[in-house]
Amino acid sequence: MKKNITVLLILLLSASFSFSQIPIEEYRAEIEKLETETQINEYWNNLHKIDQEILVRTTNLKIADSISISNMIKTSLIFDIHGTKGYNPNGFSGFLTIINLSHNYIGQCQLAYWPIIEKCAEIGGTIDSFGGKYPAYELESVSSTFYNYSLFNQEIKYPKLIEKLRKIKTQNIIDELSKSLEYQNKLRELNEVKVLHSWSKQRFENRIDEGKFSFVKMSNNGIYIKIYRRIKKLELMKTNLKSKVYRIENEPFGWKYVYGNDGSLILIDDEENELIKYTLAK
């Protein structure tokens, strides 16, 4: 088992630094060779070890993305090829399917992977109570990745947000995950040209966190939001007399940023209710 983890890590490192695609067909072939429930269960356990022993300890974002997306792709392949055979909803496999989402920090990946979360919710098990009653933990992962916003104790919003995620149609989970990695690698080729403004990080309306995030202009002349060493493209939705309204590319909830000419910034929901008014960083 340790040999398998080592081999996989070598493959992932190679893919990460050469910009090559994740070897999906190799993954498919090795998963198709699994025959018994015991073999499939061991494979699930192996993916869980990769997450816990390699992914969570990796500080290189490029490597972490390759490992994370590979685990997501393998999870999808297992369900496609073997269904729930060898899947233990209360064991490592049930746990892994959830943390695949929370340990990934690319919004496009999370949206592509959401049908897997829905599948696991139908089966039940660990997902029913992990990180709070479903779908608290899973929605928190999505809102944190896209907007760095916490939905803690906001259960009233869950049904509407779940419905919005369900309306996002993913034609092919594996293809979408692979494209997400390619797109992330293209973003890494961009250079930062200018910081427009920076604000204190804030996941809750009345609590300021350590650190800051920024709106930046990149070398392709695009405007991006930069936070936790990652950038996400901003799309201009409206220009007002004293502000501009932006949305994050592919964001799922219809939330937007109102960016004032004076450097102010407010996160609003799809009904234009104020969620957070940020503090300008000096």
Image: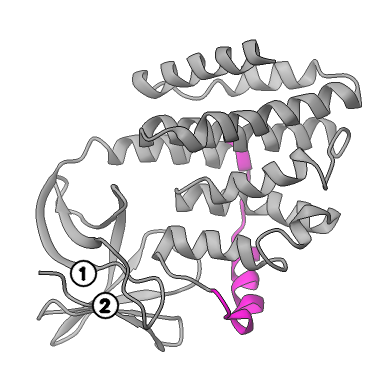
Q: Residue 200, located in which quarter of the rendered image? A: bottom left
In terms of sequence position, does the residue under pointer 1 or pointer 2 come before the other? Answer: 1
Position of the C terminus, as image quadrant, is: bottom left
**Left/right of residue 234 with respect to residue 249 in the rendered view:** left
Decide whether residue 87 is among the magenta residues.
Answer: no
Q: Residue at x 77, y 52 (%)?
A: 120
The reply to whether discs 1 and 2 touch (Cβ–Cβ < 8 Å) is yes
**Left/right of residue 120 with respect to residue 102 in the rendered view:** right
Q: Residue 78, located in which quarter of the rendered image? A: top right
Rounded to the nearest angstrom, the CA distance separating label 1 from label 2 is 6 Å
Q: Which residues are magenta?
A: 152-174
Q: Which residue is mark 2?
A: 278
Q: Which residue is mark 1?
A: 199
Q: Residue 211, located in which quarter of the rendered image? A: bottom left
**Left/right of residue 259 with respect to residue 10 in the rendered view:** left
Structural crowding at the residue carrying mark 1, measured as other residues with C-alpha within 10 Å and reported as few (<14), some (14–19) or many (≥20) = many
